[in-house]
Image: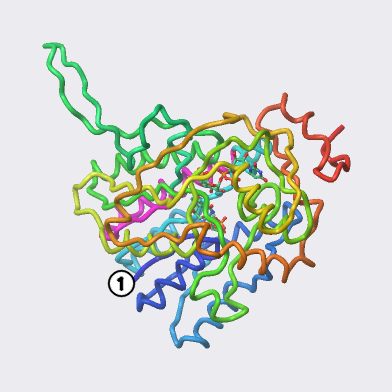
Amino acid sequence: MKIAVLGGDGFVGWPTALHLSEQGHDVHIVDNLSRRWIDTELGVQSLTPMDSIQERTRIWHHETGRRIHFHLLDIARDYDLLKAWLSEHQPDAIVHFAEQRAAPYSMKSDRHKNYTVNNNVNGTHNLLNAIVETGVDAHLVHLGTMGVYGYSTVGAAIPEGYLPVGIETMEGDVVQQDILYPANPGSIYHMTKCLDQLLFQFYAKNDGVRITDLHQGIVWGTHTKQTRRHEQLINRFDYDGDYGTVLNRFLIQAAIGYPLTVHGTGGQTRAFIHIQDSVRCVELALKNAPERGEKVKIFNQMTETHRVRDLAKLVAKLTDAEIAYLPNPRKEAAENELVVQNNKFLELGLDPITLENGLLDEVVEVARKYAYRVDRSRIPAVSAWTREIEPTLNRDPEGKKLKSAS
Ligand code: NAD
Ligand code: USQ
């Protein structure tokens, strides 16, 4: 298949592009490299040294003889170029990773809120609009989030996208319907993914666009089979307070002797998936496209759930790290249960990599190798969800006054 990987220079997009290329697909990365600019804005860099996208694809060609093409394009702003690109390249499938994906970044300021909404919602809408306008019959696979559901459980497992409900008619009968599970976003970023869901629902119904939405949990790990092949194929690894996600942050903090930064009591339960499983799920989704006219296919792309403090304890036991319980910068439930259905991918053959598979050690090893690249001052999470929370974030876990504190 000819596959466009939008956002293919990113943390999940890059290993996905390699995986699909190795399987013999003709892979085209479309990316505006905004994530690299955001690194510059924040004064941070990936823990792992990342080469330019052109250099990465050159190494891939050198290693495998396969070509991955790169196209510099902003899908949120360059609508006409996107339309022309689709018309010219006629992909069979489009994997859409190209969004601003950090919840803390999306809550940093009013400007960051606007940027995240404009980038994510316009990007997704431009793409759907251009697919219809050009008549390209591509299967669209979008990377969504478990966060569209919120994380609380009412004593029932979260279904895969749709909730079967009975609605009482005026005659007193009950009709059954599958509705989108009520959206309950916890940040501006997560809200954009809820809006994406409505755009998908409309375009599938109105124009018969074939869409799969993957409600993914927190991705951990760094290497996949293909990124291990060469030092310069290495994946990006975010550790800073905005883009670093919880388990990867704990692993790098452990590697450099920094106290593990648990927000609040650490009673938050979240869904997780290893990066290797994430790329495999995209492959499975591509192989199981919906028919034209079918409603949006939704999968929960996660393999296990964990409480944040349990993860901290696990990493502390593995590495002798200390744990710091910090004021929570976010407005979120201090404690929640989370039970999630994920049968669809398991039925398609996903064999989950769990925390017990020993890959935690591998991440700590990578973190130790590149520890010299870490700027400790960028570790604290300082993006507050509300004005009231901001003054509480005044000290870092090592007791130093934070720059943002008055
Ligand atoms: P990332 O920030 O590393 O990669 C996103 C890529 O998209 C970047 O290379 C960026 O330059 C590009 N991009 C952003 N806006 C663009 C635009 N307007 N035009 C073209 N390119 C654009 O993020 P990631 O961690 O790889 O996540 C990829 C997707 O998966 C996101 O949509 C995210 O919401 C979703 N997801 C990620 C995780 C996770 O833990 N990383 C979990 C669940 C879902
Ligand atoms: N947390 C800590 N300490 C830290 C970092 C985070 O306790 O140092 C806590 C947070 O307060 C939160 C939980 O860990 O309760 C998860 O935070 P996170 O930053 O790991 O994940 P999140 O903000 O939810 O976002 C990430 C990705 C996003 C994706 C989402 C999937 O950045 O793109 O959509 O995971 S999910 O969480 O399932 O919605």
Query: Residue beneath label 1, please?
Result: 1
Question: Residue 198, located in which quarter of the rendered image?
Answer: top left
Type of amino acid under label 1: Met
Indicate which quadrant contains ligand 2: top right
Residue 274 lies, in percent from the top left, at 49, 59
Question: Is 227 colored magenta in this rendering?
Answer: no
Q: Could you say whether the residue bearing mark 1 is in a helix, strand or loop?
A: loop
- x 39%, y 64%: residue: 280
Q: Would you say the beta carbon of the disc 1 residue lies within 8 angstroms of ligand 1?
A: no
- Image quadrant where one finds the C terminus: top right
Residue 206 lies, in percent from the top left, at 24, 42
Vertical placement of residue 53 versus 354, above or below? below
- x 67%, y 28%: residue: 386
- x 65%, y 32%: residue: 385
Extreme residue toward the top, this view? 171
148 with respect to 246 (left or right): left
Badge 1 crowding class, 10 Å Cα cut-off, few under 14, some 14 to 19, many 20 or more, is some
Residue 304 lies, in percent from the top left, at 45, 49
Q: Which residues are magenta?
A: 114-143
- Is 39 in front, or is 74? 39
Vertical placement of residue 220 versus 110, above or below? below
299 with respect to 400 (left or right): left
